[in-house]
Image (cartoon, rainbow, N blue to C red):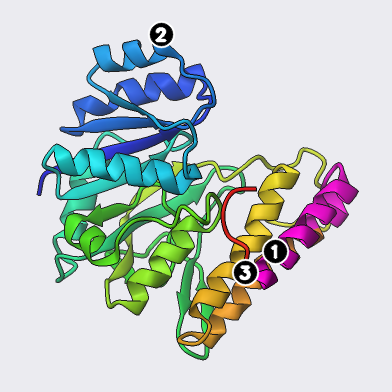
Amino acid sequence: MKHGTLVTLYKPSAAQIDHLLGLPAHSPAVVAVDNSPVVDRELHARLAAHGVDVVANHNRGGIAGAFNAGVEFLIRRGCDVFFIFDQDSTVPADYFERMLTGCATVGDTRFLVGPRIFNRNFRRNLPLFTVRRWSARITPIGDGARGLLPCSVIISSGTAISLDAYRALGRFREDFFIDHVDAEYCMRAQANGVPVCVNADVSLPHELGSPSARQHWPRVEIFDQSALRHYYAARNCILVARDYWRRYPAMLLINLITLKHVAFILLHARDKRTKLHAILCGVTDGLRGRYGRV
Protein backbone atom coordinates (compact mmCIF):
# COMPACT_ATOMS: atom_id res chain seq x y z
CA MET A 1 0.00 0.00 0.00
CA LYS A 2 1.35 3.40 -0.99
CA HIS A 3 0.28 5.85 1.65
CA GLY A 4 0.10 9.60 1.66
CA THR A 5 -0.29 12.13 4.46
CA LEU A 6 -2.66 15.08 4.66
CA VAL A 7 -2.17 17.76 7.32
CA THR A 8 -4.71 20.55 7.73
CA LEU A 9 -3.35 23.97 8.66
CA TYR A 10 -5.00 27.05 10.12
CA LYS A 11 -2.62 29.74 11.34
CA PRO A 12 -0.06 27.11 12.46
CA SER A 13 2.54 27.83 15.13
CA ALA A 14 6.29 27.64 14.52
CA ALA A 15 6.48 24.37 16.48
CA GLN A 16 3.70 22.84 14.40
CA ILE A 17 5.49 23.83 11.19
CA ASP A 18 8.75 22.35 12.44
CA HIS A 19 7.00 19.04 13.12
CA LEU A 20 5.36 19.09 9.68
CA LEU A 21 8.73 19.57 7.99
CA GLY A 22 9.87 16.23 9.39
CA LEU A 23 6.99 14.17 7.98
CA PRO A 24 8.41 13.61 4.44
CA ALA A 25 11.12 11.46 6.04
CA HIS A 26 8.41 8.98 7.07
CA SER A 27 5.71 9.30 4.40
CA PRO A 28 6.24 9.15 0.60
CA ALA A 29 3.71 11.91 -0.11
CA VAL A 30 2.83 14.76 2.24
CA VAL A 31 0.39 17.55 1.46
CA ALA A 32 -0.49 20.48 3.71
CA VAL A 33 -3.94 21.90 3.06
CA ASP A 34 -3.83 25.46 4.34
CA ASN A 35 -7.20 26.82 5.44
CA SER A 36 -5.70 30.04 6.80
CA PRO A 37 -7.54 33.17 5.58
CA VAL A 38 -4.35 34.77 4.20
CA VAL A 39 -1.83 32.91 2.03
CA ASP A 40 1.64 32.89 3.60
CA ARG A 41 3.78 32.53 0.48
CA GLU A 42 7.00 32.42 2.47
CA LEU A 43 5.67 29.54 4.56
CA HIS A 44 4.42 27.68 1.50
CA ALA A 45 7.79 28.05 -0.21
CA ARG A 46 9.54 26.73 2.90
CA LEU A 47 7.24 23.71 3.03
CA ALA A 48 7.77 22.97 -0.66
CA ALA A 49 11.54 23.18 -0.22
CA HIS A 50 11.29 20.42 2.41
CA GLY A 51 9.16 18.10 0.28
CA VAL A 52 5.73 19.12 1.53
CA ASP A 53 3.21 19.92 -1.20
CA VAL A 54 0.78 22.72 -0.39
CA VAL A 55 -2.84 23.31 -1.33
CA ALA A 56 -4.16 26.78 -0.44
CA ASN A 57 -7.81 26.02 0.29
CA HIS A 58 -8.82 29.41 1.80
CA ASN A 59 -11.25 27.58 4.14
CA ARG A 60 -13.52 26.59 1.24
CA GLY A 61 -15.86 23.98 2.65
CA GLY A 62 -14.23 24.31 6.07
CA ILE A 63 -12.39 21.31 7.48
CA ALA A 64 -14.41 18.98 5.23
CA GLY A 65 -13.27 20.94 2.18
CA ALA A 66 -9.66 20.64 3.34
CA PHE A 67 -10.03 16.87 3.74
CA ASN A 68 -11.51 16.54 0.26
CA ALA A 69 -8.86 18.72 -1.36
CA GLY A 70 -6.05 16.82 0.35
CA VAL A 71 -7.38 13.33 -0.35
CA GLU A 72 -7.97 14.12 -4.01
CA PHE A 73 -4.44 15.52 -4.28
CA LEU A 74 -3.06 12.28 -2.83
CA ILE A 75 -5.18 10.20 -5.20
CA ARG A 76 -3.51 12.03 -8.09
CA ARG A 77 -0.17 11.11 -6.53
CA GLY A 78 -1.09 7.42 -6.73
CA CYS A 79 -1.78 6.82 -3.03
CA ASP A 80 -4.24 4.18 -1.91
CA VAL A 81 -4.20 4.91 1.84
CA PHE A 82 -4.59 8.44 3.21
CA PHE A 83 -3.55 9.55 6.69
CA ILE A 84 -5.31 12.67 7.99
CA PHE A 85 -3.81 14.86 10.71
CA ASP A 86 -4.67 18.11 12.42
CA GLN A 87 -1.74 20.47 12.91
CA ASP A 88 -1.99 19.76 16.67
CA SER A 89 -1.01 16.09 16.35
CA THR A 90 2.50 14.88 17.15
CA VAL A 91 3.25 11.96 14.83
CA PRO A 92 5.75 9.36 16.13
CA ALA A 93 8.49 8.22 13.73
CA ASP A 94 7.15 4.65 13.52
CA TYR A 95 3.51 5.70 13.24
CA PHE A 96 2.90 4.90 9.59
CA GLU A 97 4.58 1.49 9.65
CA ARG A 98 2.63 0.37 12.71
CA MET A 99 -0.68 1.74 11.48
CA LEU A 100 -0.30 0.09 8.07
CA THR A 101 0.47 -3.20 9.79
CA GLY A 102 -2.85 -2.89 11.60
CA CYS A 103 -4.70 -1.86 8.44
CA ALA A 104 -3.49 -5.02 6.70
CA THR A 105 -5.36 -7.12 9.29
CA VAL A 106 -8.78 -5.49 8.83
CA GLY A 107 -9.90 -8.17 6.37
CA ASP A 108 -11.47 -5.64 3.99
CA THR A 109 -9.89 -3.28 1.47
CA ARG A 110 -12.34 -0.62 2.65
CA PHE A 111 -11.50 0.74 6.08
CA LEU A 112 -11.25 3.67 8.45
CA VAL A 113 -8.64 2.92 11.11
CA GLY A 114 -7.69 5.42 13.79
CA PRO A 115 -5.04 5.31 16.52
CA ARG A 116 -5.58 5.26 20.24
CA ILE A 117 -5.85 9.02 20.86
CA PHE A 118 -4.11 10.27 23.99
CA ASN A 119 -5.69 13.59 24.92
CA ARG A 120 -2.83 15.66 26.32
CA ASN A 121 -5.22 18.18 27.83
CA PHE A 122 -6.85 15.60 30.12
CA ARG A 123 -4.02 13.05 30.24
CA ARG A 124 -6.06 10.04 29.18
CA ASN A 125 -7.09 8.01 26.13
CA LEU A 126 -10.27 8.86 24.29
CA PRO A 127 -12.81 6.05 24.79
CA LEU A 128 -14.44 3.91 22.12
CA PHE A 129 -17.85 5.12 20.94
CA THR A 130 -20.07 2.36 19.58
CA VAL A 131 -23.60 2.81 18.24
CA ARG A 132 -26.03 0.02 17.48
CA ARG A 133 -29.66 0.35 16.55
CA TRP A 134 -31.02 0.69 20.08
CA SER A 135 -27.90 1.26 22.13
CA ALA A 136 -24.83 3.47 22.38
CA ARG A 137 -21.82 2.58 24.47
CA ILE A 138 -18.72 4.47 25.61
CA THR A 139 -15.91 2.08 26.54
CA PRO A 140 -12.57 3.17 28.05
CA ILE A 141 -9.44 1.94 26.26
CA GLY A 142 -7.13 0.49 28.88
CA ASP A 143 -3.35 0.55 28.64
CA GLY A 144 -3.41 -3.22 28.08
CA ALA A 145 -5.68 -3.06 25.02
CA ARG A 146 -4.16 -4.55 21.86
CA GLY A 147 -5.03 -4.93 18.19
CA LEU A 148 -7.98 -3.55 16.26
CA LEU A 149 -11.01 -2.50 18.31
CA PRO A 150 -14.21 -2.15 16.24
CA CYS A 151 -16.26 0.96 16.99
CA SER A 152 -18.59 3.44 15.31
CA VAL A 153 -16.90 6.84 15.49
CA ILE A 154 -13.24 7.91 15.52
CA ILE A 155 -11.84 11.42 15.34
CA SER A 156 -10.25 12.42 12.06
CA SER A 157 -6.71 13.14 13.23
CA GLY A 158 -4.46 10.15 12.72
CA THR A 159 -7.06 8.19 10.78
CA ALA A 160 -6.08 6.01 7.84
CA ILE A 161 -8.69 5.88 5.07
CA SER A 162 -8.31 3.45 2.20
CA LEU A 163 -8.92 4.51 -1.38
CA ASP A 164 -11.58 1.81 -1.68
CA ALA A 165 -13.39 3.23 1.36
CA TYR A 166 -13.25 6.77 -0.05
CA ARG A 167 -14.60 5.57 -3.39
CA ALA A 168 -17.40 3.69 -1.64
CA LEU A 169 -18.37 6.52 0.72
CA GLY A 170 -17.63 9.63 -1.32
CA ARG A 171 -16.47 13.04 -0.19
CA PHE A 172 -16.64 14.53 3.28
CA ARG A 173 -19.75 16.65 3.87
CA GLU A 174 -18.78 20.26 3.20
CA ASP A 175 -22.25 21.41 4.22
CA PHE A 176 -21.25 20.45 7.79
CA PHE A 177 -18.26 22.82 7.40
CA ILE A 178 -16.62 22.04 10.75
CA ASP A 179 -17.37 19.94 13.86
CA HIS A 180 -18.65 16.36 13.65
CA VAL A 181 -17.56 16.06 10.02
CA ASP A 182 -15.67 12.95 11.13
CA ALA A 183 -18.66 11.58 13.08
CA GLU A 184 -20.89 11.86 10.03
CA TYR A 185 -18.31 10.14 7.81
CA CYS A 186 -17.87 7.30 10.29
CA MET A 187 -21.61 6.75 10.61
CA ARG A 188 -21.83 6.74 6.83
CA ALA A 189 -19.13 4.09 6.82
CA GLN A 190 -20.93 1.96 9.39
CA ALA A 191 -24.22 2.28 7.50
CA ASN A 192 -22.46 1.03 4.35
CA GLY A 193 -20.61 -1.85 5.98
CA VAL A 194 -17.16 -0.21 5.92
CA PRO A 195 -15.12 -1.25 8.99
CA VAL A 196 -14.31 1.49 11.52
CA CYS A 197 -11.66 0.56 14.09
CA VAL A 198 -9.17 1.90 16.60
CA ASN A 199 -5.70 0.39 16.43
CA ALA A 200 -4.92 0.06 20.13
CA ASP A 201 -1.28 -0.80 19.35
CA VAL A 202 -0.60 2.77 18.19
CA SER A 203 -0.96 5.86 20.38
CA LEU A 204 -1.17 9.39 19.00
CA PRO A 205 -0.75 12.35 21.40
CA HIS A 206 -3.23 15.04 20.44
CA GLU A 207 -4.66 18.25 21.88
CA LEU A 208 -8.42 18.51 21.67
CA GLY A 209 -9.16 22.21 21.92
CA SER A 210 -7.95 24.40 24.76
CA PRO A 211 -8.85 23.46 28.34
CA SER A 212 -10.04 26.30 30.52
CA ALA A 213 -7.49 27.50 33.03
CA ARG A 214 -10.42 28.54 35.22
CA GLN A 215 -11.82 25.04 35.74
CA HIS A 216 -12.61 24.19 39.33
CA TRP A 217 -14.76 21.50 40.89
CA PRO A 218 -16.85 19.94 39.42
CA ARG A 219 -14.47 19.39 36.48
CA VAL A 220 -16.07 18.82 33.07
CA GLU A 221 -13.97 16.93 30.54
CA ILE A 222 -14.68 19.15 27.58
CA PHE A 223 -12.67 21.96 26.08
CA ASP A 224 -13.29 25.65 25.65
CA GLN A 225 -13.89 27.09 22.20
CA SER A 226 -15.35 30.13 20.50
CA ALA A 227 -19.05 30.88 20.38
CA LEU A 228 -19.05 30.08 16.65
CA ARG A 229 -17.59 26.62 17.28
CA HIS A 230 -20.21 26.02 19.97
CA TYR A 231 -22.82 26.88 17.33
CA TYR A 232 -21.46 24.41 14.79
CA ALA A 233 -20.99 21.67 17.40
CA ALA A 234 -24.58 21.95 18.64
CA ARG A 235 -26.08 22.28 15.15
CA ASN A 236 -24.10 19.42 13.64
CA CYS A 237 -24.87 17.04 16.51
CA ILE A 238 -28.52 17.42 15.59
CA LEU A 239 -27.81 17.11 11.86
CA VAL A 240 -25.88 13.86 12.33
CA ALA A 241 -28.75 12.52 14.43
CA ARG A 242 -31.29 13.65 11.79
CA ASP A 243 -29.37 11.86 9.06
CA TYR A 244 -28.98 8.53 10.89
CA TRP A 245 -31.67 8.19 13.56
CA ARG A 246 -33.98 6.06 11.39
CA ARG A 247 -31.32 3.38 11.04
CA TYR A 248 -29.72 4.01 14.43
CA PRO A 249 -32.27 5.59 16.81
CA ALA A 250 -29.61 5.52 19.55
CA MET A 251 -27.68 8.11 17.53
CA LEU A 252 -30.01 10.70 19.06
CA LEU A 253 -27.85 10.36 22.18
CA ILE A 254 -25.05 12.26 20.41
CA ASN A 255 -26.88 15.39 21.50
CA LEU A 256 -25.78 14.70 25.08
CA ILE A 257 -22.49 16.22 23.94
CA THR A 258 -24.30 19.54 23.65
CA LEU A 259 -25.48 19.21 27.25
CA LYS A 260 -21.85 18.71 28.32
CA HIS A 261 -20.95 21.91 26.48
CA VAL A 262 -23.75 23.74 28.29
CA ALA A 263 -22.53 22.38 31.64
CA PHE A 264 -18.98 23.47 30.86
CA ILE A 265 -20.10 26.99 29.93
CA LEU A 266 -22.25 27.39 33.03
CA LEU A 267 -19.49 26.16 35.33
CA HIS A 268 -16.26 27.42 33.79
CA ALA A 269 -16.44 29.49 30.59
CA ARG A 270 -16.14 33.19 30.01
CA ASP A 271 -18.71 34.99 27.83
CA LYS A 272 -21.42 32.64 29.08
CA ARG A 273 -24.32 34.53 27.55
CA THR A 274 -22.73 34.73 24.09
CA LYS A 275 -21.80 31.04 24.03
CA LEU A 276 -25.15 29.84 25.36
CA HIS A 277 -26.91 31.96 22.75
CA ALA A 278 -24.69 30.40 20.06
CA ILE A 279 -25.69 26.91 21.23
CA LEU A 280 -29.37 27.88 21.19
CA CYS A 281 -28.99 29.16 17.63
CA GLY A 282 -27.20 25.96 16.66
CA VAL A 283 -29.93 23.78 18.14
CA THR A 284 -32.60 25.85 16.39
CA ASP A 285 -30.86 25.66 13.01
CA GLY A 286 -30.21 21.94 13.45
CA LEU A 287 -33.89 21.27 14.11
CA ARG A 288 -34.74 23.33 11.03
CA GLY A 289 -32.30 21.30 8.94
CA ARG A 290 -30.03 24.21 8.13
CA TYR A 291 -26.65 23.14 6.74
CA GLY A 292 -23.66 25.10 5.42
CA ARG A 293 -21.42 27.89 6.58
CA VAL A 294 -22.82 30.74 8.64
Residue 42's label in the rendered image is 2
* Residue type highlighted by circle 3: Gly
Q: Secondary structure at mark 2?
A: helix
- Distance between the Cα atoms at labels 2 and 3? 41 Å
Image quarter of residue 266: bottom right
Residue 117's label in the rendered image is none
Residue 285's label in the rendered image is 1
Is residue 57 in view?
yes
Q: Is residue 212 magenta?
A: no
* Sequence order check, earlier mark of 2 and 3: 2
Q: Does residue 40 sit above or below 131 in this rendering? A: above
Name the residue furthest top: 42
Residue closest to the eye, 135 or 273: 273
Q: Residue 29: horizontal and vertical position, in percent?
A: 19, 33
Q: Does residue 287 sit above or below 232 in this rendering? A: below
Q: Is residue 272 magenta?
A: yes
Number of the front mark, 2 or 3: 3
In magenta, the rendered stretch is 264-288
Image quarter of residue 113: bottom left
Q: Secondary structure at mark 1?
A: helix
* Residue type highlighted by circle 2: Glu
Asked if the residues shown at circle 3 and circle 1 are in contact, with their CB atoms under 8 angstroms apart, the answer is no
Q: Does residue 128 sit above or below 291 in this rendering? A: below
Q: Residue 122: horizontal and vertical position, in percent?
A: 61, 48
Residue denoted by label 3: 289
Q: Residue 224: horizontal and vertical position, in percent?
A: 71, 45
| Residue shown at 87% from the left, 43% from the top | 271
Looking at the magenta stretch, what is its main secondary structure? Answer: helix
* Residue type highlighted by circle 1: Asp
Number of the front mark, 1 or 2: 1
